[in-house]
Amino acid sequence: MNARVLVVEDNKDLLELFSRQLQILGFQVSVAKNGVEALAAALTDHPDVILMDIEMPGMNGLETVSRIRANPETRRIPVMAITGWAFRNSRQTYMASGFNDYIAKPFTHKELLPAIAQLLRDSENKSEASSMIAAAKARPD
């Protein structure tokens, strides 16, 4: 079974790009364009991992991850911040806000796959993580 990834991104072009790349890499992908949609999708789609933009209109990524962590049905889902706002202490800031990890835009599949694999390993989905790492090593740049 392929890992299920929820991509939360308000930029239509980036949402389409991320979704296509993840599908090509073998993920089952669902999408949300904002925090409200992300909360609903987290409950209905049961993703293994959520990739979430930080800067979104309405409910931003920080508020959305806070609500995900507050809900007993979604609190254990690993959430990775995907952001263009990467500074020296970004990792600590995002981790303290409830994210499991972060990756700065722009990124490649060679950066994204190991990060997702680590989240899956940490969430006890070890078999999926192992196959992802093998796939990442086999794909050309």
Image: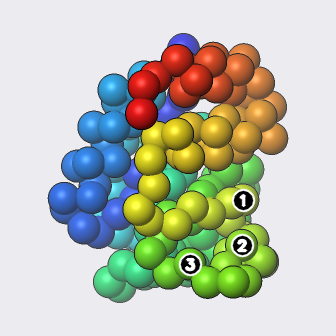
Q: Is residue 70 visible?
A: no
Q: Along the line of sight, which residue is nearer the eye, 45 or 110?
A: 110
Q: Is residue 138 above or below residue 61?
A: above
Count up the numbered dots: 3
**Residue hosting label 2:** 91
Residue at the front extreme?
141
Residue position marked by numbered label 3 in the rendering: 86
Q: Amino acid at mark 3?
A: Ala
Q: Where does the image place residue 8, in percent across and percent down from the top left? A: 40, 59
Tell me if residue 31 can be seen.
yes
Seen in the picture, residue 76 relative to 39 is either above or below; the reply is above
Query: Measured from the top left, where is residue 17 in percent x and y?
Result: 26, 48
Nearer to the camera, 74 or 23: 23
Instruction: Check disc 1 and report the residue beneath it.
Output: 100
The residue positioned 62% from the left and 18% from the top of the image is 134
Q: Mark 3: which secondary structure?
A: loop
In space, the residues marked 3 and 2 are separated at their CA atoms by 8 Å
Between circles 2 and 1, the one closer to the viewer is 2
